[in-house]
Amino acid sequence: MTGRVADQLAALIELDLLDQELIALRGEEKSAPKVLAALVRQVQERSGVRDTTAGKLEATTKANREGERQLEVIERRVARAAARLDGLFVSTQIEATQREIEQLGLQRDEVEMAVLEGMEVADRLAEELVGAEAAVTEAEASLAVARAAWDERAPVVAARCAELETAQDAVLPKVHKDTLRMYMVGIENRQNSTPRGITRTNGIMCTMCQTDIPVVWVNEARNGEGIHLCLCCKRVIVGKVDVALSDEPTAGPDYQTRRD
Ligand SMILES: [Zn+2]
């Protein structure tokens, strides 16, 4: 490429390479805290479930113990009434005591049933608690792994960003301010799914958005004679697809054969 804007297009290609890596790294820096925060929330949620289950189990166990104490009281009253019965001779007193023993028996059955049911509930809650505790442990482990990974990765990302910014500073003086403005259009175009300032052509098609571009522009870009924006994605057309720079999404399977 030897045209009058060839050096501008070449500088944009350099700038794009730096920008693409920077955008990816900054995306990583932005998403990492969100991922960690989500894991923290997961630990909190699971801890909440565990605490609720533990609370229910404690309340049920307490109620069961209270029921058992009631049973003991009833048994003692039955025993006392039975002992009293032995010393009674008046029929009305005997009948009253027998009724009392009968009533106590009914009461005992009722409390006994409640305790049995309560013990089943406690067993189920104890099982749930084991599961809930395991879930907390698992979430805490995931968080610890993610934290350790990011603690290690963050300085690497920061250092690489600094390197790329330095390299950018070296390239930017080579780019004319109007060229840079055109380059920024594609990066800032909200319609584009990928923030990127340049595109290439495959035949007459933009490789970034698959729109056909006027042949004159395609040729000018290829020969370094003109700076044009793709009609659709507004990225600067820097030339035809090149195997050495094939990181862009390319068109159909005939892309190799259509290169000229
Ligand atoms: Zn395009």
Image (tube, rainbow, N blue to C red):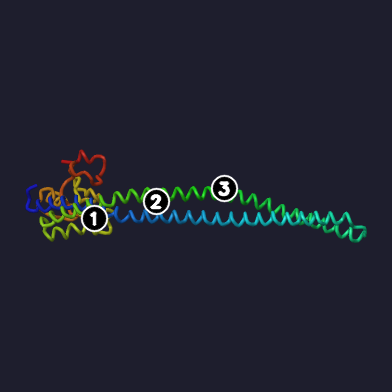
Front residue (pair 182, 62): 62
User: Which of pointers 1 and 2 lies earlier in the amino acid sequence?
Assistant: 2
Q: Amino acid at mark 1?
A: Cys
User: At 45% from the left edge and 56% from the top edge, which residue is drawn?
Assistant: 44
Considering the numbered disc 1 on the image, is that residue within a helix, a strand or a loop? loop
Left or right: where does residue 255 sit relative to residue 57?
A: left
Front residue (pair 207, 203): 207
Q: Residues within 10 Å of mark 3 (few under 14, many from 20)?
A: few
User: Would you say the beta carbon of the disc 1 residue lies within 8 angstroms of ligand 1?
Assistant: yes
Front residue (pair 249, 78): 78
Image x and y of residue 65, in percent: 66, 55
Callout in the foreground (3, 1): 3
User: At 38% from the left edge and 56% from the top edge, which residue is drawn?
Assistant: 37
260, above or below 112, in the image? above
Image x and y of residue 199, in percent: 20, 51
Q: Which residue is mark 3?
A: 127
Q: Is residue 20 visible?
A: no
User: Which of pointers 2 and 3 lies earlier in the amino acid sequence?
Assistant: 3
3D distance between C-alphas at marks 2 and 3 = 25 Å
Furthest-right residue in this view: 90
Q: Amino acid at mark 3?
A: Glu
Image x and y of residue 46, in percent: 48, 53
Q: Which residue is mark 2?
A: 143
Front residue (pair 260, 166): 166
257, above or below 177, in the image? above
Q: Which mark is residue 233?
A: 1
Callout in the foreground (1, 2): 2
User: Would you say the beta carbon of the disc 3 residue lies within 8 angstroms of ligand 1?
Assistant: no
